[in-house]
Image (spheres, grey):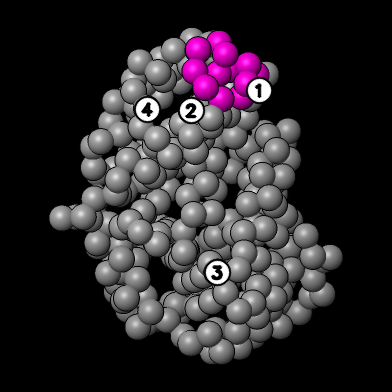
Amino acid sequence: MAHKSPGVKAKALGTQLRVCREDAGLNMRDAAEAVDCDKSALSRLETGSRRVSVEEVALLLGVYRVRGALRDELLAAARSLDESGWWGWGQGLASLPKAMVTLAECESEARRVTNWAPMLVPGLLQTMYYARAWLLATGTDRERVEMLLAARATRQRILSTEGQEFIFFLGEPALFTSVGDAGVLATQLARIRELGERRNVSIRVLPAGAGPHEGQLGSFVVMEFPATGPLVLVELMRSSVFLDDEVQTQPYVAALSTLSTLALSEAESMRRITQVQAGLGLVSVPAG
């Protein structure tokens, strides 16, 4: 049975340690000197390209003055690097949700990223108007909203990366779900159509009447890598779970085949989105 090497988990842990270092106001050279190691060794640790021990992580967290639940969580992650299966993080980092940082890092390494979004336009496709309206409606603090929007805008640049493929299966209800006013939705649909014209982006709509299928259980993201097995992200209310064991990821990969069978073609999907946009009868607000 093929399992992911410590690479993905180690990369995720390294990313969190980098954020902790930056939050502590330390550059890599100062941090390396504080723990008596080479700068290159710390760099490899933060990129997940070398193994790291629990003792090393504990030492770094002490230098970075990380305490409490976050320290316990990162030490637990260090202990489980060689374990297969699921792993998850909540919203512990002071700057950005850890799952968002980890997701961005994993997306950048993937050769193909496939999103299934039955009810809500996925983050990589969202305009800032749509994203802001949704975050505010779900109770996110206004100051935090702007920070999250800036991070999302940066993350969306990946859609222009040559050599990577992005596939989006959108449930038809996602095209109608009211997020903000009708102008915000019209702009969002126009943005989806625009992105669908890119060579490395495929957008397909799953009709509401397609019948029962596994995807009705909820949204997920499948990331495929050149040399390792797939990684699956399942978002929960206050946290996110990553799955890296073949037994656990296989049902999600299989679900993508079902979605591909049931979904409209790319051309049909663009026509359907155009119909929905036209039905709003409004001119969209400036793209953003």
Point out the frontmost of discs 1 and 2: 2
Earlier along the polypeptide chain: callout 1 or callout 2? 1
Mark carried by residue 74: none
Amino acid found under the numbered disc labelled 2: Ala
How far, Cα to Cα, is label 4 from label 3? Answer: 30 Å
Q: Which residue is mark 3?
A: 163
Say which residue label 2 marks: 41
What is the CA distance from the residue labelled 1 to the residue labelled 4? 19 Å
Q: Residue at x 54, y 54 (%)?
A: 108
63, 235: nearer the viewer: 63
Left/right placement of residue 257 relative to residue 238 reads left
Near mark 4 (Cα within 10 A), the count class, few <14, some 14-19 or many ≥20, is many
Q: Are marks 4 and 3 in contact (CB under 8 Å)?
A: no
What is the magenta range? 26-39
Q: Earlier in the sequence, mark 1 or mark 3?
A: 1
Q: Position of residue 160 (x, y in %)?
A: 65, 66
Q: Secondary structure at mark 1?
A: loop
Residue 230, how many percent across, how many down?
Answer: 34, 58
Q: Quadrant of the N terminus?
A: bottom left
Mark 1 lies on residue:
27
SS label for mark 2? helix
Q: Residue at x 46, y 64 (%)?
A: 111
User: Does 94 appear above or below 173?
Assistant: above
Q: CA distance from mark 4 to mark 2?
A: 10 Å
